[in-house]
Amino acid sequence: MGEVEIKKRIEASRSRVTKVVFPNTTNHYHTLFGGTAMELMDETAFITATRFSRKKVVTISSGRIDFTQPIPADTIIELIAEVVSIGKTSLEVKVDIFQEDMYEENTKEKSISGVFTFVALDENNKPTQVL
């Protein structure tokens, strides 16, 4: 597969998920639980990895996750995921979470960022080529 086809595939697999941070997903500081953010990031990364490879994939690791801004309850968040690296049987997906105030315009800012690594599996659950 050529570089142009891979770039098109990366673009086509980019995923966006929008959610609201409700009080039941926050901690005693009324901000999004870190574990909940990581779960949402892993799920969005999984969607992206699957769309890219069109194979069974599983998370094998998560890299550094940077929590740069707390995300308060009653905030809209958008998770944006994109393939950033492709190996023989694995791929890496970067996920950014942006937050925005529900009732103010032009408040969107990046709050959390991380990278998740997936491996593609064959019908016997053994690693297989991503492409």
Image (cartoon, rainbow, N blue to C red):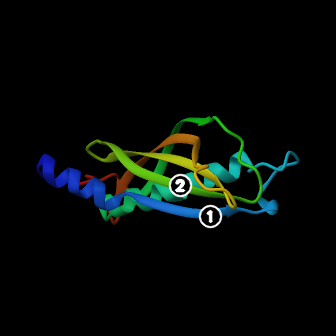
Q: Position of residue 16 (x, y in %)?
A: 47, 60
Relative to the observer, which residue lies in front, 8 or 53?
A: 8
Residue occupied by mark 1: 19
Q: Amino acid at mark 2?
A: Leu
Which quadrant would residue 78 be assigned to in this image? bottom right
Residue at the location (29% across, 53% down)? 10
Is residue 17 at all visible to an observer of this figure? yes
Which quadrant would residue 54 be assigned to in this image? bottom left
Considering every residue shown, the one lying at the far left of the view is: 2
Disc marking residue 79: 2
Q: Is residue 66 left or right of residue 26?
A: left
**Judging from the image, what secondary structure is the residue with disc 2 in?**
strand
**Judging from the image, what secondary structure is the residue with disc 1 in?**
strand
Image quadrant occupied by the C terminus: bottom left
Considering every residue shown, the one lying at the far front of the view is: 105
> Badges 1 and 2: C-beta atoms under 8 Å apart?
yes
Q: Amino acid at mark 1?
A: Lys
Is residue 125 at all visible to an observer of this figure? no
Disc nearer the start of the sequence (1/2): 1
Q: Is residue 81 left or right of residue 2?
A: right
Residue at the location (11% across, 49% down)? 2
